[in-house]
Image (cartoon, rainbow, N blue to C red):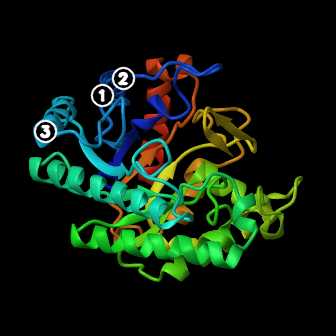
Amino acid sequence: MSNTHPKLHNAMWPGLVGKGDEEGQEPTISLEKMLELTAGAEVNGQKFEGVDYFLFEPHTNPAASDDELKKIADLIASHNLVVGSLVAPVWPGTVGDSAMGSDEQQAKFLEAIQAACRIAKVFNEHGVRQYGVIRIDSAEFGVEKWREDAETNTARIADTFRKAANIAADHGERLAAEGEICWAGMHSWRDMLNLLEAVGMPETLGFQADLAHTYLYLLGYNAPEHALVSEGYSDEEFWSAYKQMTDQLRPWTIDFHVAQNDGQVHGAGSHDKTGKHCPADDPNGKLDIVKCSGYWLDGAEDRGIKHICWDGCMFPNEMLLRQDTWNTILETMINVREAHGA
């Protein structure tokens, strides 16, 4: 009998992140179209069961009324999908600002957490959302400013995160900090662990692991001193390093993105260079997706993980708009669940 847990979700933000009307950018893809493509995917009778959702325009106005949010919930439910994890609009230019910044910037960051918790409450009471976390990061692009005084800057981010976690706890929510090489103080596996430990609230603030981003943790992009493998590594060296990294971060991991990476970085628009997401069947992909997922999903149920999500962030529109792209992704997700679910 096929496994039914964790539930299989698709991310909606690939239709937004890196998209826009600036030179070299592609147009955004509407929520309606992303939902249509997600609901249209099917492999041997299995479909996606939910979506993870970015709380910003043009998909969602963070200041939308409760009635407007309920209409969005109805739209998602009409596709036989539920909502899982939400992405708080913490970045400059959305609601928030740098978690490493001034008191004014910190206040904007915390305002974004309040907005996300309010929307989560509407979705929860509607019934379209019954599990998942709220995702955050430091909202500080690049690491050069952080390096000017790493200890002080990490302490500042930790202070912001603790205040954010207290807000989340008051709303019955948990926050997951996304490990990604472009976020100051979160740009290597060691710095990410240091930050989580500095916050020291594992019951409320944990880690979101993404296969594409954490692969670059191994290589030491943006933090060569923390590299665990060198170019030309052997299989034995890779799996030994992978175990070392996941043993440290897995206990903190409360949200998980399935993805592929070809060892390159990528950026678009205002989004700094970060882990390049590749198609699930990319011949240049460096990861055994199913095997790598097992390292993160060991004990996942005990940490409250009820779903996994595919992240195709910054895929070109031509790829995003093909239905067979999502069928291939869904098949990969099913394979992960069959190997590591229940």
Residue at the farthest right position: 232
Q: Is residue 340 visible?
A: no
Residue for badge 2: 30
Using the rendered view, name the quadrant where residue 302 is placed. Answer: bottom left
Residue type for callout 1: Ala
Gap between marks 3 and 1 measured at Cα: 19 Å
Characterize the local packing of mark 1: few (<14), some (14-19) or many (20 or more) Cα atoms within 10 angstroms: many
Viewer-nearest residue: 339 or 231 = 231
- Single out the mark in the foreground, 3 or 1: 3
Disc 2 vs disc 1: Cβ atoms closer than 8 Å? no
Counting from the top left corner in percent of width and height, residue 101 is at 55, 63
Q: Position of residue 155 (x, y in %)?
A: 58, 78
Q: Position of residue 320 (x, y in %)?
A: 50, 23
**315 vs 177: above or below:** above
Residues packed near mark 3 inside 10 Å, few (<14), some (14 to 19) or many (20 plus):
some
Q: Amino acid at mark 2?
A: Ser
Q: As shown in the figure, which amino acid type bears the numbered disc 3?
A: Lys
The residue lying toward the viewer, choosing from 165 and 86, is 165
Please state if 76 lies on the left or on the right of 245 as rendered.
left
Q: Which residue is mark 3?
A: 70
- Secondary structure under the numbered disc 3 in the rendered image: helix
Location of mark 1 (residue): 39
